[in-house]
Image (spheres, helix red, strand yellow):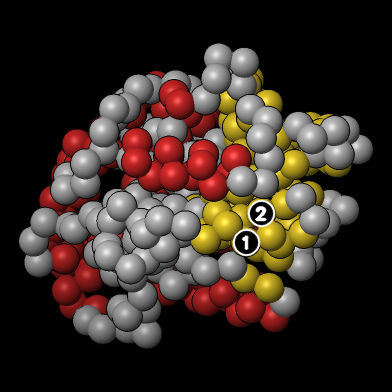
Amino acid sequence: MKPSPGRPGLVPELVEVAPGVHAYIQPDGSWMINNTGVVVGSDDSLLLVDTTSTEARNRALLASVASVCPAEPRYVINTHHHGDHTFGNWLMPPSTVIVGHEACREEVLAAGLLAAQVLTGPDYGHLEVRPPSLTYATSLTLHLGTRVVELHHPGPAHTRGDTVVWLPAERVLFTGDLVFAGGQPFLAEGSIHGYLSALEFLRSFDAAVVVPGHGPLLRGPEINRVLDDLVAYTTYLSELATSGHAAAKTPMEVVREAGESRFSSWQESERLVGNLHRAYHELDGKPLSERLELPRVWRDMMELHGGPIACHA
């Protein structure tokens, strides 16, 4: 497999996690470098879980997929609207059905190509916006021959329109960005309270394999260890937000005064201040459907980062 178009030496890997089920893992899992999934049905139909960010990365993904299944994708599931999971939708044949939560479709259309404008640096190549054409509200089951693929909405968490993809027979769970393995979660477009609920929802599947949106595959005891860490992070975030909001401090003031924590070494530690903006929004009693001013949030994240946030996609 060819090296990643981003940082030299980081090679995407297609890993078979169950017969006919693969995870496409892209190291190092930082901004716009996500994981995707490949599911082949008993009838040789093909389903993809997400696409990726740049044109080069998406073409590399499709070439890798073709090595295990020559069929055109029947379905692409978007686990949420962010560009690193949806920017490759346009490369799919017209016959491919793009599936997502109803709020995912709304957010894809509202965001457009914003991610490529904010996270500058990569050569994104040609991009087009292609939203889900089939949406659902709570759950949806697809049948690839005898293979069952379940889609579930955990409620607002990472975003308003998250989807988890569950293969019950294989006990494989694709979480999208509800799980960042090794990185801080990004909740500025979701819900702090909802994210805690979503983590327990993920735990309830008792999965054998978890494919996170970013970071390495998780198996066995690693799954609950990472979920426990994410719960601890979100609890810490919530406590910071509650005390800072009560004291009328800005999210940036709260982060500066808090100093280092055991989560500071996780990738994308600048997300803490962005997540605090969302926590304040909820503490103010504003509806989840009301979007934050992302440029303002991003400015605070860059300040905490110490300059422009690098993207190596």
Q: CB of mark 1 within 8 Å of CB of mark 2?
A: yes
Nearer to me, 313 or 188: 313
**Which picture quadrant has residue 301?**
bottom left
Q: Nearer the viewer, residue 168 or 103?
A: 168
Which element type, helix, strand or loop, lies under badge 1? strand
Residue 58, visible in the rendered structure = yes
The image shows residue 215, relative to residue 53, as above or below, that is below
Asked if residue 205 is positioned above or below residue 190 in the image, the reply reads: below
Q: Residue at x 76, y 32 (%)?
A: 45
Q: Residue furthest right?
A: 146
Structural crowding at the residue carrying mark 2, measured as other residues with C-alpha within 10 Å and reported as few (<14), some (14–19) or many (≥20):
many
Question: Mark 1 and mark 2: span between their CA atoms?
Answer: 5 Å
**Which residue is pictured at 91% across the width and 38% down the height?**
146
- Closer to the camera in the image, 10 or 203: 10
- Mark drawn on residue 111: none
Q: How many marks?
A: 2
Q: Residue at x 37, y 85 (%)?
A: 262
In this rendering, the answer to whether 13 lies above or below 298 is: below
Q: Taking the image as drawn, is residue 152 in sight?
A: no
Measuring from the top left, give residue 229's x and y in whole percent.
52, 76
Q: Is residue 185 above or below residue 240?
A: above
Residue 26, x across and y down, in percent: 45, 59
Say which residue label 1 marks: 15
Crowd class of label 1 (few under 14; some 14 to 19; many from 20; radius 10 Å): some
State which tag comes first along the sequence, 1 or 2. 1
Locate residue 310, reporting x and y percent.
19, 58
- Indicate which disc residue 22 carries: 2
- The amino acid pointed to by label 1 is Val
Residue 193: where, in percent of width, then height?
Answer: 52, 55
* Amino acid at the residue labelled 2: His
Task: Name the side, left or right, on which 93 lies relative to 39.
Answer: left
**Extreme-top residue of the structure:** 94
